């Protein structure tokens, strides 16, 4: 009788399944954290990723590695999303955030096995995270956007942990100048990175990367019909209609069996195109950008010939996603039919010139109408692997500067903030009671994963280094961090390793949030 009631009770109050689900979630999410741990920090390793269609990507960027990893477990996917969220929020720290989440899950696992309720852990972690942000904010130093030196140092720190680190002297100033160019440093509180266009072109080396105050197009000027390739005081028109004979809606065949009729058709075609070209010229337009068309040829030889006779510079195959940036820079408006192509739709630039650098031709449009609103960065590199990694690294550097525009405060790097917060949290935990104190303590210990990993990846002894680091911080040296160059603990500010407050604070907060979400899951339902 007793047995039946027990089994009866069990089938309704099955405690085992939630434990199993939680366990499997934690294990698979932790595996993701472990997989990218090795790429943290300036001495971290890089990953080579082969995509399903055979492409190869070499990168050190956490978000990119995770994006390409095709993880199956839903909990592991949450960590991929976590990294993406950090990428959106801060842009840098996408490896750190996952490593921290992994460590927090490890801590949670231990506490679960001791019988602490998952909700208690989750909530305590959330509070510990907001307390950490408080401590980080207290540690940080405020900066001004006119302090270009600090911006440069923060940008180079983020570039130092990348494959292209040897070029950080070149890329960091480009990133800082680009952001400062598109904002008003005295009032700005955010930056729209869409205003900074990164253009990649294979050829040359990263040394040839440059900041162009204006617009860079990788399409070439059409020269087959002898038109101009350099225009000063350019009036730029951007058209989305086609300069070729119209086609019937359906596949039709016209059989012409009379020479006179044939002549007439050709003449009509000529007249039709000449008419459009003349209308374009009449507006004063001397540079014509033509959007790529999928329906029919955007422009044919005959109209190119007319345009060159009318001294109009032509660039064709403008991509759809370039349109917005071109319009914002030059002030032109895209036009979909010839009747609405009027003078007020034209943009303006001082100079359009096709230049040849390192064997590649590009078009530079400078002195644009809306100067100061947009800027372009032309990245050069010997092959597309390095080019793409350079773009991702530059994106991180731009994001670091954006973080500083959003929240104008800097903290030291090299494991210093994590250790400091960890110690202050443990201190704070002593003022708490019961389970919460225990959870805060565990959270504080988990944060040590960053210095431990930085030391491990730099080939140092993590136990010695972290113990030393802890001692120095206990003695009040708030900026003591891991000097990976010398392999010891030094004042990391002297090494110029600084990072935005927002990167570290959002990493801790987002990691805690994801851990909270994971801990509160007690069942996995798959619907087929
Ligand atoms: N020269 C340095 N010495 C010591 N620590 C450094 C140095 N440069 C960077 N760091 C530390 O390395 C960590 C950042 O490493 P990394 O840039 O590889 O990862 P991430 O920023 O988390 O992710 P990602 O850059 O891939 O988005 C930070 O904790 C930072 O303080
Ligand atoms: Mg980084």
Image (tube, rainbow, N blue to C red):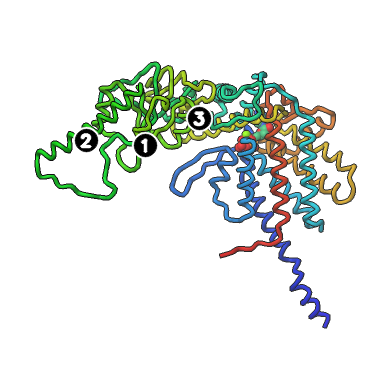
Q: Residues within 10 Å of mark 3 (few under 14, many from 20)?
A: many
- In space, the residues marked 1 and 2 are separated at their CA atoms by 21 Å
The secondary structure type at the circle numbered 1 is loop
Front label number (2 vs 3)? 2
Q: Where on the picture, by quarter, is residue 203?
A: top left
- In space, the residues marked 3 and 1 are separated at their CA atoms by 19 Å
Would residue 211 be found to the left or right of residue 487 on screen? Answer: left
Q: Where on the picture, by quarter, is residue 521?
A: bottom right
In the figure, 24 relative to 353: above or below? below
Would residue 266 be found to the left or right of residue 355 on screen? Answer: left
Give the image quadrant in which the ligand numbered 2 is located. Answer: top right
Q: Residues within 10 Å of mark 2 (few under 14, many from 20)?
A: some
Report x, y in % for residue 216.
44, 26
Q: Residues within 10 Å of mark 1 (few under 14, many from 20)?
A: some
Quadrant for the N terminus in the image: bottom right
> What residue is pinned by disc 1?
292
The secondary structure type at the circle numbered 2 is helix
The secondary structure type at the circle numbered 3 is strand
Looking at the image, which residue is at 17% across and 34% down?
267
First in sequence: mark 1 vs mark 2 = 2
> What residue is pinned by disc 2?
269
Mark 1 vs 2: CB contact within 8 A: no
> What residue is pinned by disc 3?
197
Report x, y in % for residue 40.
64, 38
First in sequence: mark 2 vs mark 3 = 3
Foreground: 480 or 367?
A: 367
In the figure, 2 relative to 78: above or below? below
Would residue 185 be found to the left or right of residue 437 on screen? Answer: left
């Amino acid at each position: 009788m007793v047995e039946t009631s027990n089994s009866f009770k069990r089938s309704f109050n099955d405690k085992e399944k939630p434990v199993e689900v939680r366990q499997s979630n934690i294990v698979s999410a932790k595996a993701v954290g472990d997989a990218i741990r090795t790429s943290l920090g300036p001495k971290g390793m890089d990953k080579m990723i082969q995509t399903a269609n055979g492409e190869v990507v070499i990168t050190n960027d956490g978000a990119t590695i995770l994006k390409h990893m095709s993880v199956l477990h839903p909990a592991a996917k949450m960590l991929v999303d976590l990294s993406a969220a950090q990428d959106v929020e801060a842009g840098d720290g996408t490896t750190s955030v996952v490593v921290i989440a992994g460590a927090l899950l490890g801590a949670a696992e231990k506490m679960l096995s001791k019988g602490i309720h998952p909700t208690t852990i989750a909530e305590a972690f959330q509070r510990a995270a907001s307390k950490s942000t408080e401590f980080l904010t207290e540690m940080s130093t405020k900066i001004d956007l006119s302090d270009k030196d600090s911006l440069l140092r923060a940008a180079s720190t983020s570039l130092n942990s990348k494959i292209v680190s040897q070029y950080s002297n070149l890329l960091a100033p480009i990133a800082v100048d680009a952001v400062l160019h598109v904002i008003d440093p005295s009032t700005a509180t955010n930056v729209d990175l869409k205003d900074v266009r990164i253009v990649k072109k294979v050829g040359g080396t990263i040394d040839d990367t440059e900041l162009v105050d204006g617009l860079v197009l990788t399409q070439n000027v059409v020269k087959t019909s002898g038109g101009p390739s350099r225009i000063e005081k350019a009036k730029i028109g951007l058209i989305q209609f086609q300069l070729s004979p119209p086609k019937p809606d359906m596949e039709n065949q016209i059989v012409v069996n009379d020479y006179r009729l044939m002549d007439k058709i050709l003449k009509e075609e000529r007249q039709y195109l000449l008419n459009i070209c003349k209308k374009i010229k009449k507006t004063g337009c001397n540079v014509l950008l033509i959007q790529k068309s999928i329906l029919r040829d955007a422009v044919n030889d005959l109209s190119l010939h007319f345009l060159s006779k009318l001294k109009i510079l032509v660039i064709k195959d403008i991509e759809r996603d370039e349109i917005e940036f071109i319009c914002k820079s030059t002030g032109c408006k895209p036009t979909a039919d010839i009747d609405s192509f009027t003078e007020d739709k034209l943009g303006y630039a001082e100079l359009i010139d096709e230049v040849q650098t390192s064997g590649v031709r590009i078009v530079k449009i400078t002195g644009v109408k809306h100067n100061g609103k947009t800027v372009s960065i032309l990245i050069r590199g010997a092959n597309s692997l390095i080019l793409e990694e350079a773009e991702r690294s530059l994106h991180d550097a731009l994001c670091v500067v954006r973080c500083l525009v959003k929240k104008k405060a800097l903290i030291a790097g090299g494991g210093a903030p994590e250790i400091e917060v960890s110690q202050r949290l443990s201190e704070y935990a002593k003022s708490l009671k019961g389970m919460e104190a225990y959870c805060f303590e565990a959270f504080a210990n988990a944060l040590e994963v960053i210095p431990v990993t930085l030391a491990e990846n730099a080939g140092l002894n993590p136990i010695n280094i972290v113990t030393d680091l802890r001692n120095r911080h206990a003695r009040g040296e708030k900026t003591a961090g891991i000097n990976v160059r010398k392999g010891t603990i030094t004042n990391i500010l002297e090494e110029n390793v600084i990072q935005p407050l927002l990167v570290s604070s959002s990493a801790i907060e987002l990691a805690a949030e994801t851990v909270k979400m994971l801990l509160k899951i007690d069942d996995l339902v798959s619907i087929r």
